[in-house]
Image (cartoon, helix red, strand yellow):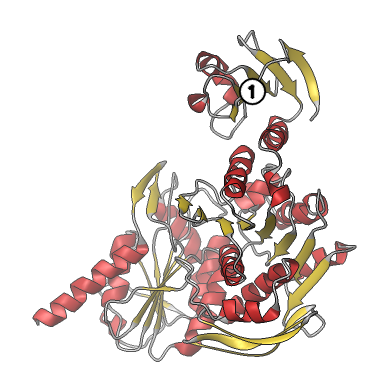
Amino acid sequence: MEIVSVDGNMDVEITDIQYDSRLVTPGSLFAALEGFTTDGHRFLSQAAENGARAALVGREVDDAGMTVVRVADTRSALGRAAQIFFDAPSAGLFLAGVTGTNGKTTVALILEEMFLEAQLTPGVIGTISYHYKDTSITPPHTTPQALDLIRLLADMRDNGVTHVSMEVSSHALDQGRADTCMFDTALFTNLTQDHLDYHGDMETYFDSKARFFREIAGRGKETVSVINIDDEWGERLAGEMKQGLVTYGFRSTAGISIRSHQADMEGVRGEIVTPRGSFTFASNLLGVHNIYNIMAAVGGALAANIPLPVISRALGRKIVVPGRLEAVERGQDFLVLVDYAHTDDALKNVISTLRPLTAGRLITMFGCGGDRDKRKRPLMARAAADMSHQVIVTSDNPRTEDPNAIIEDILVGLEDVDITRVEPDSHRWDMDDKLYTVMPDRREAIAFAVNHARIGDIVLIAGKGHEDYQILGTTKYPFDDRLEAARCLDERLGEQGNG
């Protein structure tokens, strides 16, 4: 690491590493990180009081009462220190990193099933949970901070985990959280508009993802890069790769491709062609977009030298991805699905999957998060309106923005679409007209969608998926789309039974 200066005795024993001064114990190294809302340098005295023996800092500080090492980049230095302290845990694990806008969680969980089928011991690090064996941790981030990530990998290694599938977010890549990890395979799913509130533009967003393959892949291990070349950004990225490249896609020139496929309410089936031969598969996962996720996971499994028959059997296991087209069943005669789709591309994929399978009407309910990329809001509206019969626009984690202002941004996307706005109490909801309405209260919107569904309809509740909270202002309140939908269904079915 690039050391600018040292103040104090370097010959001290370090017993732990922390970047939260409240967690410091005697003998710790405290890393003073500068964040978006706070600055670790403000807590050096608290860290010293709690027994910190040394500190990593990014700027000149007054006497801190301990050894102070000033470095050029505290985040990078912290990752390197953790890598040394925990004895490079990823070196002893098979580590598969999955990046891209959509599909990361699903690919990571498919890989877990493949590792299990191969009688390996898997761990997963991602949006829904960090888990291995009997341990499950609710994640504060899709990809942990560098120190937390290295500590978690060390815990997995020390508890007998052999293979880890890990989501690698663009924020994590931009902030260097995974820089010291050694990856056996790096997978790229796709790139569509998202997180531009953070990255600014698509080119910068792409560069953050590409950094995984340009700079991190190949460090310490010969990394196999598995890239979707049906995606324009993936095709561009694949063109940069000099070695260790496996491509996938529907085109026959891809290294992993589809020879034939079917998709219906039972899932997806088909034949996959790989550099090691072909095999048939049948999965309960819904939609053509999940065939892409399956092909990505196949690439990761091949990098782990898992045989094709084992991969095929793994795909036949019931794969449950919480909040991804997750059905809410209460014995009703229509389908209610909860999905995490929160970009226009993800929403298009889900709706295009469901529309051909809908015997009645497809009713889509969605919103857009506050304090996030505003440019995708009208795009999501158009994606919802293009193939849905009826659309309900609502709130989705408004954070510090006015929910009504967010909705106004969304409605811009419906100005040139052949869809009619009506009030929720309109009698036209019982007809087959192409309609939309606005209901800012998400709980009321879910109840409205469920109560107006008819036999054969599909109700899609999009945007939050597995999340069990709603963020209003800066506070998280308990809220789960799945539980809300279940409650509404119970009330509706109870009323019908009483009637």
Residue that badge 1 annotates: 14
Residue 239: x percent and y percent?
A: 86, 66
Residue 412 visible in this rendered orientation of the protein: yes
Does residue 34 sit above or below 61 in this rendering? below
Q: Amino acid at mark 1?
A: Ile
Q: Horizontal placement of 184 versus 472: left or right?
A: right
Q: Horizontal placement of 450 versus 145: left or right?
A: left
Residue drawn 66% across the image and 19% down it: 13
Q: Nearer the viewer, residue 425 or 207?
A: 207
Residue drawn 38% across the image and 89% down it: 360
Give the farthest residue toward the left. Answer: 498
* Secondary structure at numbered mark 1: loop
Screen quadrant of the N terminus? top right
Residue drawn 67% across the image and 14% down it: 67
Residue 163: x percent and y percent?
A: 64, 59
Q: Nearer the viewer, residue 228 or 346?
A: 228
Residue 416 visible in this rendered orientation of the protein: no
- Choose top left, top right, bottom left or bottom right for residue 298: bottom right
Does residue 151 sit above or below 331 in this rendering? above
Residue 351: x percent and y percent?
A: 50, 78
Q: Horizontal placement of 346 versus 4: left or right?
A: left
